[in-house]
Amino acid sequence: MSRNIVISQSMYFPWVGLLEQIRLADVFVHYDDVQYSKGSFSNRVQVKGVDGVGWMTLPLRDYHLGQRIDEVLLNDRTDWRGKHREMLRQAYRKAPFRDEMLGVVDRVFSENVETVADISRRSMLELSRYFGLDRPTFLSSQTLPISGASSERVCNIVEYLEGNVYITGHGARAYLNHGLFEERGISVEYMHYQRTPYPQLHGVFTPYVTALDLVANCGSQGAAMIHSGTVGWKEFTQ
């Protein structure tokens, strides 16, 4: 019997593809004790509005190079919650489930948070609850007694969690040591994203925006669009 492990940096109100990874996971590990990369999806996401696709970005406070994601502070000297809520309210003012979407946002914004990791994790968990993606156990990498770096640490985490399948997104292709996993009897599978179109406002469909877009346009029935599977790493890399 397979035990699927997904390890990913937390993302702020992520795109549907990350929810698809969560759907397939038995254990999902928030990998936030690694270096923050400026311009990553940890603190920003695309929103599709009347004037096209724009960015909804969390402001940072006292950020310096080398900080981990779970160390990067949010700048609460600005009303970023109000700004983001208004951006979403305007973008989806004609969406059939706009109020449900804003309810998801308000539940996330009502919690006390200090770091980018805090708010991003909460946004992912709230979206998962909304769509009924309650299969996985959610853990944080900083709570696990696992050392190493890069592929070795990821493999060590999967092994520690007694996983035999590691599921990952496409970005891992550039650095993952697939042979290391094979040596330990762990299968590596990459997401086979379907990017299934659903009714969407403002022109040509794009799958790369926040999953709040799916909430606003389809409500909880949007869970049917979260259905992508995986392919083995050898097939994927070919």
Image: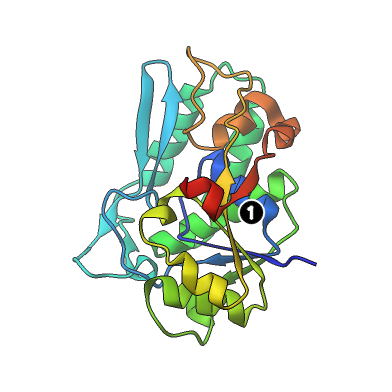
The vertical placement of 197 against 227, above or below, is above
Splitting the image into 4 quarters, where does residue 186 fall?
A: bottom right
- Quick one: 218 or 156, which is closer to the camera? 156
Q: Which residue was labeled with disc 1?
A: 22
Q: Quadrant of the N terminus?
A: bottom right
The vertical placement of 147 against 38, above or below, is below
- Quick one: 23 or 69, which is closer to the camera? 23
Q: Please count the marks in the image.
A: 1
Could you say where residue 207 lies in the image, as x and y percent from the top left? 51, 30
Splitting the image into 4 quarters, where does residue 104 fall?
A: top right
Left or right? Give the position of 147 relative to 235: left
**Mark 1 Cα within 10 Å, few/some/many (few <14, many 20+)?**
many
Left or right? Give the position of 19 relative to 89: right
Query: Residue placed at 71% from the left, 43% from the top?
Result: 131
Disc 1 marks a residue whose amino acid type is: Ile
Could you say where residue 110 lies in the image, as x and y percent from the top left? 55, 53
Could you say where residue 80 lies in the image, as x and y percent from the top left? 36, 45
The kind of secondary structure element at disc 1 is helix
Q: Is residue 113 visible?
A: no
Could you say where residue 229 lies in the image, as x and y percent from the top left? 66, 44
Q: Is residue 38 visible?
A: yes
